[in-house]
Image (spheres, rainbow, N blue to C red):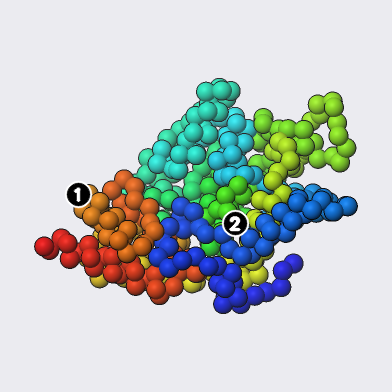
Amino acid sequence: MTPPITMPEFVAGFIDEPGYLDHPRLSPIGEHALAEQRAITDVHARARFGSYAALDEQDERVRTAVASLVRMRPDQIVFQPSTSQALMHVMFGLTGGVAASPLEFPAVGYAMTRAAQSLGVLVPHAITPEHDRITPGVVREQLSSSVVAVAVSLVDYRTGHLVDLEGIRQVIGDRLLIVDAIQGAGIVDAPWELVDVIASGGQKWLRAGQGTGFLALSDRAREQLTPVWSGWLAHGRPELLHDVVEPASDAGAFRVGYADAAAQARLAGAVEAVLAVGVPSIRDVIIERTAQLIAIADEAGIEVASPREDAERAGIVVLAPHPEFTSALAAALHNHGVSATVRDGRVRLGAHVSTGDDTLDQLRAALAEFTAGLTV
């Protein structure tokens, strides 16, 4: 286990340039992950006698780290290169009705549709959000008796709303609860014990870079999911088998072939650092930073479409200017070196622990330029 570290020590592991507020899209990789990348690359390049054993060790290491993060067992975790691939495994393994909002990140809808088209055993059910939110009440009112699983995002990528997992668990009963956790893993200490399936990538708030992710399955989920896309390493045995055998009884059944050991090491290093400083500590800093982003937007008179209550948000702040002014706002941000995502007439910002006052000053200057242009 990684020894505890202080928040300043954790922050020192990041060197992103001032002005970066696009963490919900892709977070700059931290030294906690980069050091692992360099170490594995060195093993690969030198190929010292016996050194390649270190590559095989990364699978258990990353599963152990992620298991601690989501409070599950290592055998309930399987490494995945992305959230999207993890969701594909899940949806292709389900039989029955699966309910989700059409406004979830497209990875959810694509996985559901492809599974339904290919196997004909999954039946998509649409849940219509109310005021851009999926709430327990919305789920309860629109839940069909044929639904066996409900899929939600821990944090809505469009608005930054933090979903009420406890409330949703109460209204769906013993149906499987599937959570796309990519916009919250590492910064939200969610009630993971209530979740059956957790799919996440490490390139956003965990800051492990692209090609990193995981799928976590409760014992109940593993029993109900069929490992359709299950490869030659999914049997869970050390020997090479030419006969096609049944996949393992744990999450390892959803392995296909060898994973990228460097990616596994990056994710393990990043998660271990998060555990060492503590998710609650990280969340406290990010909540403070997002409150500052909202205050700066308020100063400029720009509408904020994200929740203002600390308990209802994570790291995302969405600005909603009048549609005809979105381009001008994007230009002002560009002029001041502020990285953000502009999509569907809105501007999405995201702060992390490495977001400093200089970045906030750049944002303030950009919004001042924008509002000044409106009065000319």
Residue drawn at 23 percent across, 55 percent down: 328
Residue drawn at 69 percent across, 46 percent down: 260
- Sort mark 1 into few (<14), some (14-19) or many (20+) by Cα contacts within 10 Å: few
- Quadrant housing residue 92: top right
Farthest residue toward the front? 46
Compared to residue 335, the image places residue 117 above or below, namely above
Q: Is residue 355 left or right of residue 83?
A: left
Query: Could you say where residue 184 lies in the image, as x and y percent from the top left?
Result: 51, 57
Query: Could you say where residue 245 lies in the image, as x and y percent from the top left?
Result: 81, 29
One can see residue 142 in this view: no
Decide which of tag 1 and tag 2 comes sooner along the chain: 2
Compared to residue 54, the image places residue 173 above or below, namely above
One can see residue 109 in this view: yes
| Label of residue 324 in the image | 1
Name the kind of residue labelled 2 in the image: Ala
Residue on which disc 2 sits: 208
Q: Is residue 178 left or right of residue 41?
A: left
Residue drawn at 63 percent across, 32 percent down: 93
Residue drawn at 43 percent across, 68 percent down: 18
